[in-house]
Amino acid sequence: MIQTVSVFAVPFMICGIVFWGLFRRINVYESFVEGAKSGLESTFRIVAPLVGLIVGIYMLRASGALDMFASLISPITDFFDIPADVLPLALLRPVSGSGSIAIVNDIFKNCGPDSLAGKIASVMMGSTETTFYTIAVYFGAVGIKSARHTAKAALTADVVGMIMSIVAVRLML
Amino acid sequence: MLNYIWSGMILVSIVVGVFSGRLEAVTAAAMDGAGAAVEMCVGLLGVMCFWSGLAKIAENSGLTKAFAKLLSPVTRLLFPKIKKDSKAMNAIVLNMVANLLGMGNAATPLGIAAMKELDKENGHRATASNEMCMFVVINTASIQLIPSTVIALRQMFGSQNPSEIIFPVWVCSVCAVIMGVCAAKILEKRRKLL
């Protein structure tokens, strides 16, 4: 069931969007090309930060620092039976979007996307956001000085999302 | 913040590299990583273009507005104090739909527009209103129907079933949003507006 929903989601979405466009009589193809151009721009925009952050993560990995960190936290990760590789992702996710993509890249490269760590990293990445960046952008835009309980509530959501990604992968995949 | 994280990453790897005698590997990894980053972006380029193109169709055909109607019972529940057809509510709903459909480029300007409307209703104070906090919390736990970047990355690294994560992602995001909303509701009562 779960597999079916996941497999059908993408084609259904593509089909739905295109048919809705035809139904509303807009030029579907022109809109598509126009949007695709903006995709080009936004991808180019992340090249520079990604070079910086993937270099950082790869260096950490090669120096052995990531493994040291993993063995340091292994009492906790072993206790909950989660792969130690995903913990750096959980820590960096709320702070940096490019940084977390860099870690996911590292996990996929070292463990593979279909390993337990790879699956958890995928779900974690897909279900959480760059919390602090979002808070800064939105409150910054309207000159709010005190965001009150926003960070606490948002981090609660992040923690739940992360714990749930471990649970969901174990139960569903 | 990223300033310190990034420099920390570099410094720690050099220092650890010296002590573990893997300094050469660290240098090689730096060059390797720089190449890998560009490789990854090139690999993602096509998929990003594809989804941005679809998002534009959704935007131009008014699919966002159709979705917005479906969402209105939820938004009324989340923002009881904001009038149904006000500018603020309109911007909030459109931002939520843009996030759902993965229209990252469109979502942020819409979100800022929503914040500006909420700011008016808040009397331009420097302290966030309950509605603003709620709106930002929902945005930080954004639900995306198709997590296209992750799926593309999985495919690049040769996953057997790149899209199998979609359903688990939905479950996790929904749980996260619900808990975030509850946390916001509880915390807003504890600390009264200044």
Image (tube, coloured by chain):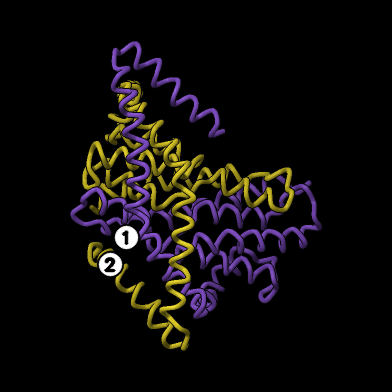
Chain colours: A yellow, B purple
Identify the subunit bearing mark 2: A
Kindly identify the amino acid type of the residue bearing the numbered disc 2. Val
**Picture coordinates of residue B72 (x, y %)?**
56, 73
Residue plotted at (65% across, 69% down): B89
Residue B170 appears in the figure: no
**Picture coordinates of residue A168 (x, y %)?**
31, 50
**Picture coordinates of residue B68 (x, y %)?**
54, 74
- Left or right, residue B117 beside residue B162: right
- Left or right, residue B190 beside residue B148: right
Residue B129 quadrant:
bottom right
Front residue of A46/B31: it is: B31
**Picture coordinates of residue B118 (x, y %)?**
71, 61
Residue B10 quadrant:
top left
- The answer to whether tags 2 and 1 share a subunit is no
Q: Which residue in the protein does label 1 denote?
A: B167
Q: Which residue in the protein does label 2 denote?
A: A5
